[in-house]
Image: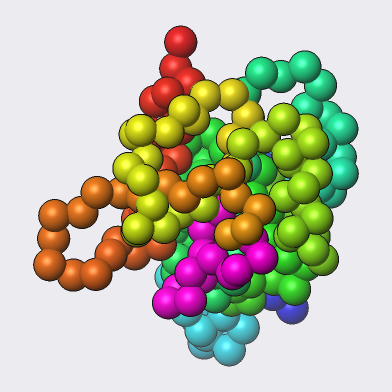
Amino acid sequence: MTYLTGFHAIEERIKSNGAKGPLLVAKAGPRAKEIVALAIEKKIRIERTGAFDLDSLAPNHRGIALQVEDEAGGADISFEDFISGLGDRKSALVIILDEITDPHNYGAILRSCDQFGVDLVLSRNRRNAKHAGVISQTSSGAVSWVAQAETPNLVRAMDALKEAGFWIYGADMEGEPVYTKDLSGRIALVLGGEGAGISRLLKERCDGMAGIPSFGRIDSLNVSVAAGVLMYEVRRQNVK
C-alpha cells in the first residue's frame, strides 16, 4: 500500500477528488481535524488506528495518512490529447522538463506551475523524479492539480508543439535576458537537469535561449527558482 503523509498533500488530493482512502488517523490535532472533516464531506472512509501501527505503515506521518493507489497523483493527460484540445486558444504555457532528477526541485517546479497557471508539464515517459511522496509534499499538493503528460521522445514532442504554433525557449544562464523575449501567445519553456542543463538535441530545437540576469556571487539560480521567475515573466507578458 502507498500512503500520503503531508497535510497539504493529503488535503489537495482529497479536494481534487483523486482519493478513495481510507484516511488513517492516529491522533487528530487541529490541522488533522480539518482534513478529517474534509474527508467526511468527500465521503472518504475514516479509520482510527494506533500511532505504533501507523508508524509501521507510514513512518513520516504526522498523526494522519491517506491511502492512495498512485502516490504521484496528478491530472495526467496524454500529450496528443493536449495538442488536439488546444483549439483556437491564442495563448498557452507548456513546461518541458529535461531530466529533472531531484524530487525536491520537481515538486517545487510543480508548485510554481500551479501558481502561474501552466497548462501542461511534459517529461520523458521514464519519470524524471521517482520519489513521488517527496514530490507531493514539496509541491504542497500541487501535483494533484497540475496537468502532466509523458512522452518517449521530447524532440518529437517539441516538433509537434512547433507545428501547433508554440515558440520554444530554453532556460540558460548564458541566454539573452528573458524580459527581452516576446513571450506572448503559445510558449514552451525547457528546463534542463541539475548540473547538465538542457541536452544538445533539445537545445537545437529551441527558438532561443532565455536567461535571468544575475548579480550574485554564486554561479546560477537553482532550477526550481529559475523556473518560477521564467513562468512569471511569461504570465506578465500575457496579462491583458
Q: In this picture, is 60 found above or below 155?
A: below
Query: 69 and 163: which one is in front?
Result: 163
Please provide percent x and percent y for residue 18: 72, 49
Residue at the image point whose x is 35% and y is 58% from the top: 174
The residue range painted magenta reads 190-202
Residue at the image point whose x is 45% and y is 73% from the top: 194
Query: 134 and 216: which one is in front?
Result: 216
Left/right placement of residue 154 relative to residue 117 reads: right
Question: Which quadrant would the N terminus be assigned to in this image?
Answer: bottom right
Please provide percent x and percent y for residue 76: 76, 50
Left/right placement of residue 35 relative to residue 225 reads: right
Q: Is residue 146 magenta?
A: no
Asked if residue 67 can be seen in this view, the reply is no
Please provide percent x and percent y for residue 125: 77, 67
Q: Is residue 192 magenta?
A: yes
Residue at the image point whose x is 47% and y is 50% from the top: 209
Left/right placement of residue 133 relative to residue 87 reads: left
Q: Which image quadrant for residue 233?
A: top left
Q: In this picture, is 11 found above or below 126?
A: above
Q: In this picture, is 100 found above or below 40?
A: below
Query: 147 and 172: which one is in front?
Result: 172
Asked if residue 219 can be seen in this view, the reply is yes
